[in-house]
Image (cartoon, rainbow, N blue to C red):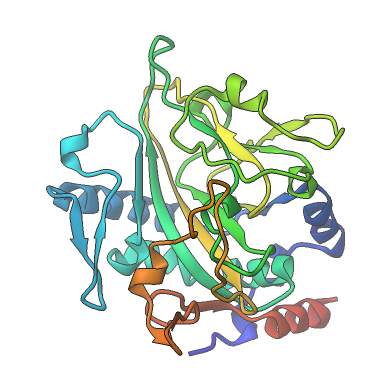
Amino acid sequence: MTTPTAKLDTDLLPTEEEVEQYRRCGWYISRSLFSDGELDAAIEASERYYATLDKQQIDLPNGGTYQLAWWQDVGLDQLRKNDYSTLLVPELDALLKKPILGAIGALLAEDDVRLWHDQLLYKPPSSPEAPQAVGWHTDFGYWRTCSSPQMLTAWIPFTDMDESIGTISFVDGSHEWPQNNHLNFFSSDLEGLEKQFNTGGAPVSKTPAVMKRGQVSFHNCRTIHGSAANYTDQPRRSIALHLQPGANRHVERRNDNGDLAQHSNDHLVRKVDDQPDYADPTFCPRVGILDDARRAREEAA
């Protein structure tokens, strides 16, 4: 069901200048989109969800299964990345389905947007002797089966974010660099990974996303990003909602090592003409309509 544009708070939509900044830098930070109550509910629900993960395999709504990167046996003090949580946790699905989030995604992608998949993230406090960072990487490096270079991610932190807690950092303009298919999410060697950048002669400029609770960052799938360790005494909690433009389709493409690229969605979504259908409404619901977002912004002008 389509959410009517009357429910959009147009003051929260990016201006044309902010959309242009996203095109230039590869990232955008929104105004506050979520209330304390919504984010408190997300924290409580994610803790309940973590408490159920006593085995690696989870069951999904279509009868399929998925092997988790984190479950309880991995250790409570480890970096957690749990995919497909919005399918199983209503409070997290409510963040995804909030109309303003999809409207911003549509304006930045210049297309209707659907969910690609989500990642519930948890970064525990680290000691300087054993930091747990998220290495420099691009999302597109993991999404080689996708046709669209305009896929993007909405990252929703559940608390205030600054460098001390290990907020996300973006490499400005890196979505335009000649080679940036980095696959280093679970590496903590940020300095070593930076030496591998192929900038095409561009300078390396990094921007940490300092955000108040309720704000959301958006970045292009080819923007290099990562995050340093969390040196506070509280976990860094967030969810990444990866979004795909309506034009995105499955394509056959080789990874850099020559192997045929694959994604877990390929085995979970329905098939059309023997190809994975990235418009499967169970796994990839539409969350933003470009015409509605543009109309709302024009009517508010």
Q: How many labels sit on residues? A: 0
- Residue in view at x 78 percent, y 76 percent: 297
Q: x and y percent of residue 240 in the render?
A: 48, 53
Q: x and y percent of residue 265 in the render?
A: 40, 67
Q: Is residue 55 above or below residue 72?
A: below
177 or 229, nearer to the observer: 177
Q: Quadrant of residue 103?
A: bottom right
Q: Is residue 3 above or below residue 230?
A: below
Q: Residue furthest front?
A: 258
Residue 154 in sight? yes
130 or 127, nearer to the observer: 130
Q: Is residue 23 left or right of residue 32?
A: right
- Residue in view at x 84 percent, y 30 percent: 203
Q: Is residue 192 left or right of residue 266?
A: right
Q: x and y percent of residue 195 in the render?
A: 67, 23
Q: x and y percent of residue 126 in the render?
A: 38, 20
- Residue in view at x 35 percent, y 62 percent: 84
Q: Quadrant of residue 83?
A: bottom left
Residue 35 in sight? no
Q: Is residue 172 left or right of residue 85?
A: right
- Residue in view at x 47 percent, y 72 percent: 97
Question: Which of the image's four quarters has the C terminus?
Answer: bottom right
